[in-house]
Image (cartoon, rainbow, N blue to C red):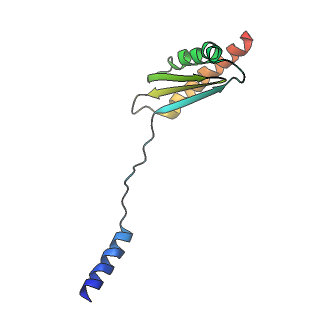
Amino acid sequence: MLFLAIAFMGIYAFSRLGVDLLPNVDLPKILIQTDYPGAAPSEVERLITEPVESTANTVPGVKKVSSITKEGVSFVTVSFEWGSDVDIRLLSLREKLDNLWFTLLEDK
């Protein structure tokens, strides 16, 4: 009977135990995906990926810019320094990419 009471108290205590094994971590990264349907990878690289990479490098606090270019799509990953406020960096990057977008539209 004593063992049953101890087991019951252990199960009850375990169910009420609050343990956070995976803390909330925000990675300081932004992924930019650009679609260009029907374009070859070399064309997407030259017309989209390279200008986006060079624009992203002008944002303060950028640690690394990497990209993957496939047929009709470009993925550019922008990594920031730890401790950077990603929301502020995102706004700055968005302003610069909007300017780039208008420049690319004018070139067509």
Against 60, residue 31 (above or below) is below
Q: Residue at 39% of width from left, 32% of height from top?
A: 82
* Farthest-out residue, bottom: 1
Left or right of 13, for residue 37? right
Q: Residue at 64% of width from left, 17% of height from top?
A: 44
Q: Which quadrant does the N terminus fall into?
A: bottom left
Q: Residue at 67% of width from left, 23% of height from top?
A: 72
Residue 83, image x, y percentages: 39, 33
Q: Residue at 70% of width from left, 17% of height from top?
A: 102
Query: As rendered, which of 40 and 87 lies closer to the eye?
Result: 40
* Farthest-out residue, left: 2
Against 108, residue 37 (above or below) is below
Query: As rendered, which of 92 and 33 lies closer to the eye?
Result: 33
Quadrant assignment, res 42: top right
Q: Disc count in the image? A: 0
Residue 67, image x, y percentages: 52, 23
Residue 96, image x, y percentages: 59, 20
Q: Which quadrant does the C terminus fall into?
A: top right
